[in-house]
Image (cartoon, helix red, strand yellow):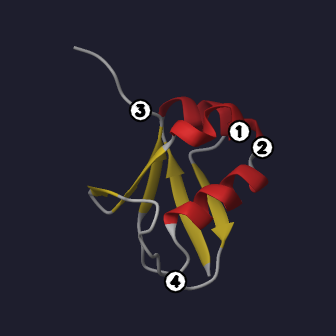
Amino acid sequence: MKLPVRLYARARDLAGADTVQIELEEGATIAMLRSALMEQCPQLQPVGSSLLFAVGTDYAAETQPLNAESQVTCFPPVSGG
């Protein structure tokens, strides 16, 4: 499946794109997505391990399975006050 992943903040800046298309097998997990994203966009590797993922409106664990309808966003940790 080709899964569009929306990038935000520093992830978008490093990748130079708002969205990237990642090829994954049906049932792939967030961990597999992270690995494929780092391979496809090596410029994200400096922040790769700290990137957060959400599916729909909920944060996603590394073990969460994905399907072709998953709406995935990726962003660095947020800080502020």
Q: Residue at x 50, y 52 (%)?
A: 6
Crowdedness of circle 4 by 10 Å Cα count: few (<14), some, many (20+)?
Answer: few
Q: Which residue is mark 1?
A: 45
Whether label 2 touches label 1, CB < 8 Å = yes
> Disc 3 marks which amino acid?
Pro
Whether label 3 touches label 1, CB < 8 Å = no
Which is nearer the N-term, disc 3 or disc 1? 1
Q: Which residue is mark 4?
A: 27
Left or right: residue 7 compared with residue 73: right
Q: Which residue is mark 3?
A: 77
| Gap in angstroms between the C-alphas marked 3 and 2 | 19 Å
Residue 42 — which label?
2
Q: For the C terminus, which image quadrant?
A: top left
| Gap in angstroms between the C-alphas marked 2 and 1 | 5 Å
| Gap in angstroms between the C-alphas marked 4 and 1 | 24 Å
> Disc 2 marks which amino acid?
Pro
SS for dot 1: helix
Crowdedness of circle 1 by 10 Å Cα count: few (<14), some, many (20+)?
Answer: some
Left or right: residue 15 compared with residue 81: right
In the rendered image, residue 62, in percent from the top left (x then y), is placed at 46, 60
State whether residue 46 is above or below residue 65.
above
SS for dot 3: loop
In the rendered image, residue 31, in percent from the top left (x then y), is placed at 55, 61
Res. 39 image quadrant: bottom right
